[in-house]
Image (cartoon, coloured by chain):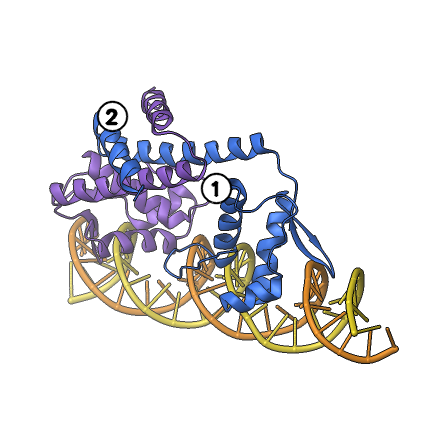
Chain colours: A blue, B purple, C yellow, D orange
Amino acid sequence: MDIILSNSSGKPIYEQITDQVKAQILSGALAAGDALPSMRLLAKELRISVITTKRAYEELEREGFLENVPGKGCFVAPQNPELLREAQLRKVEEKLSQAVEEARKGAFPLEELHQMLDILYKGDEL
Amino acid sequence: MDIILSNSSGKPIYEQITDQVKAQILSGALAAGDALPSMRLLAKELRISVITTKRAYEELEREGFLENVPGKGCFVAPQNPELLREAQLRKVEEKLSQAVEEARKGAFPLEELHQMLDILYKGDEL
DNA sequence: ATACCATGTATATAGTATATATACAGTAAG
DNA sequence: CTTACTGTATATATACTATATACATGGTAT
């Protein structure tokens, strides 16, 4: 499992982990039943504390993405694809809404937003 | 000057203040030379501490939006409209970029983003 | 001048959140 | 049962947000 931490992201470490695990479950890179690296192993790889990986896995368990079994390990829980897609759509909407809010402050026309959207969508493809 | 605080926004109070002051400068509601409510007055109106309003005004001064004069008050500094517009454009781009990033995770097509954008842009008009 | 009252400023303190080291408890294999 | 993995819980350090209180500065009426 690939997790990349950024010090400059502003987001706390445990949140960076939960975000990336969620993304990998959503993309299918992680499927129900798959074992995740143990809290200790992940902590060692990322050079952070076990408590921080625990916090991340713990939160993922609360949200229904994982099952943490004492003595055994951490596993991807059965997922509802439709719910996942719904949740992701809501994230997109939220960011888009924030973009619109900022655009309105600067009185940028809708047309300009569409153009920027095209460029960004195609630019990130590389 | 209208400032509205939200407890549920997640943003710290001082940041809510700086954001809204910046927005009012950008929109022209506040122009260069205009006096802002004194730190004490604003603190009283918002029922928060003077130190928090100070922190907000202080940060706005660091960023070149205000000038705080001991014994006199706080005033809107001369602004460069083009720089302001550039900065605002960058904010929009950033949010839009984040929306695209989330959309790619869920494999949402560009078309769908354009539709959502239209709805959000027109919906917020009310 | 000077007393007053407004302004912005600085110091010390409480509360909250992130991240940590260390010790504790459950599971399975040798 | 010992060993070597797992996940878990407690107490602690650090940083950030917000605060009360006291201090310093500028204008103004007396």
Q: Could you say which is closer to the camera, residue A26 or residue B36?
A: A26
Q: Residue at x 51, y 54 (%)?
A: A17
Q: Residue at x 26, y 28 (%)?
A: A114
Q: Residue at x 38, y 55 (%)?
A: A9
Image depth: mark 2 or mark 1 in front: 2
Whether pointer 2 and pointer 1 mark residues with C-beta atoms closer than 8 Å, the reply is no
- Tell me: residue A114, above or below residue A56: above
Indicate the chain on which mark 2 is placed.
Answer: A
Pointer 1: what residue? B7
Q: Cα distance, mark 2 to mark 1?
A: 31 Å
Q: Quadrant of residue A71?
A: bottom right
Determine whether the residue tagged by mark 2 lies in a helix, strand or loop. Answer: helix
Q: Is residue A71 left or right of residue A109?
A: right
Q: Is residue D26 left or right of residue D11?
A: left
Residue D5 image point, x, y percent: 68, 68
Look at the image and tell me whether residue A48 can be seen.
no
Residue A26 image point, x, y percent: 52, 40
Q: Which label was assigned to residue B87?
A: none
Q: Could you say which is closer to the camera, residue A99 or residue D10?
A: A99
Q: Quadrant of residue B85?
A: top left
Q: Which label was assigned to residue A110?
A: 2
